[in-house]
Image (cartoon, rainbow, N blue to C red):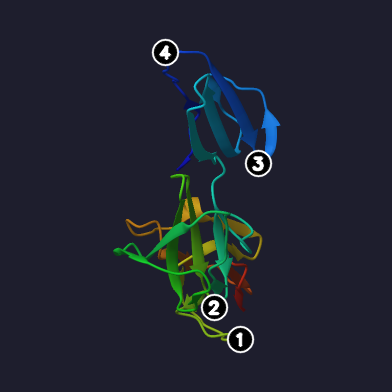
Amino acid sequence: QTTNIDVTLKIEDDIKVEKVVTLNGETIEYEDTFNKEGTYVVTVTDDAQNTTSITFTIDKTKPKFEGLSSREAHVDGYTVDITDATETTITVQKDHGDFAPITEGTAITEEGTYQLVAVDAAGNKYTTWVIVDRTEPSIANTVDGEYINQCTTVTIFDRYLNKVTINDDTYSRKDFSKNTKNENFKLEKEICEDGTYTITAIDKKGIPTTKT
């Protein structure tokens, strides 16, 4: 049996018993409650030489996904790699759809937002997000190097847009519109004053687009 909580044992016998406990193969003192991680073997023997043994494992460590720099990692792709000593169940949700089982070693290559959930044999749960993004932000309603003689409204768009600069002005996510899923960020700015404008858009992965 594997658990992620402390274990309290109750021994019932009409006569005196001897208790022997090992933790990961090392003999330790018997305690009413065991709380350290590891595999325990508790053997109880009474004066009549009747013996009972129980084996259990305490595991309080959450599984983790290897190779991800944060719990919201923006990558070109990801191969599922889990670190846990026990059997772990992994599920994935793509673009806020339904969860489905996925196995370790599976390559995630399609662009999108993925939520990965790992639950180990003890019930420890870990959740992370992987964003597969290879698309540059879009800067619309302007052509690089173009000269114009009227006002224009520039539209900057990216599913994961993070920052926009227009000359010395900087705009962040608080300045963008977005959808209800906290994606599809857009900034619209009207430009009327004479001058040369350099517009740079950067998404969460750091992919830039620049037009002048």
**Where residue 14 is drawn, which disc sits there?**
4
Judged from the image, the secondary structure of the residue bearing numbered disc 4 is: loop
47 over 207 or under it: above or below:
above
**CA gap, disc 2 to disc 1?**
25 Å
* Whether residue 68 can be seen here: yes
The one of 92 and 43 positioned closer to us in this rendering = 43
Nearer mark to the viewer, of 4 and 3: 4
Q: Quadrant of residue 179?
A: bottom left
Residue with the mark numbered 1? 145
In the picture as drawn, the residue positioned furthest to the left comes out as 98
Residue with the mark numbered 3? 24
Q: Position of residue 22 (x, y in %)?
A: 64, 34
The disc, 3 or 1, on the residue closer to the chain's N-terminal end is 3
Q: Position of residue 41 (x, y in %)?
A: 57, 37
Nearer mark to the viewer, of 1 and 4: 4
Mark 4 packing: few (<14 Cα in 10 Å), some, or many (20+)? few
**CA gap, disc 3 to disc 2?**
47 Å
In the picture as drawn, the residue positioned furthest to the right comes out as 26
Q: How many marks?
A: 4
Nearer mark to the viewer, of 2 and 1: 2
Residue with the mark numbered 2? 134
**CA gap, disc 4 to disc 3?**
30 Å
Left/right placement of residue 113 relative to residue 20 reads: left
The disc, 4 or 3, on the residue closer to the chain's N-terminal end is 4
Judged from the image, the secondary structure of the residue bearing numbered disc 3 is: loop
Judged from the image, the secondary structure of the residue bearing numbered disc 2 is: loop
Q: Amino acid at mark 2?
A: Arg
Mark 1 packing: few (<14 Cα in 10 Å), some, or many (20+)? few
| Residue depicted at 47% across the width and 24% down the height | 9
Disc 2 to disc 1: CB gap under 8 Å: no
Q: Amino acid at mark 4?
A: Asp
Left/right placement of residue 180 relative to residue 31 reads: left
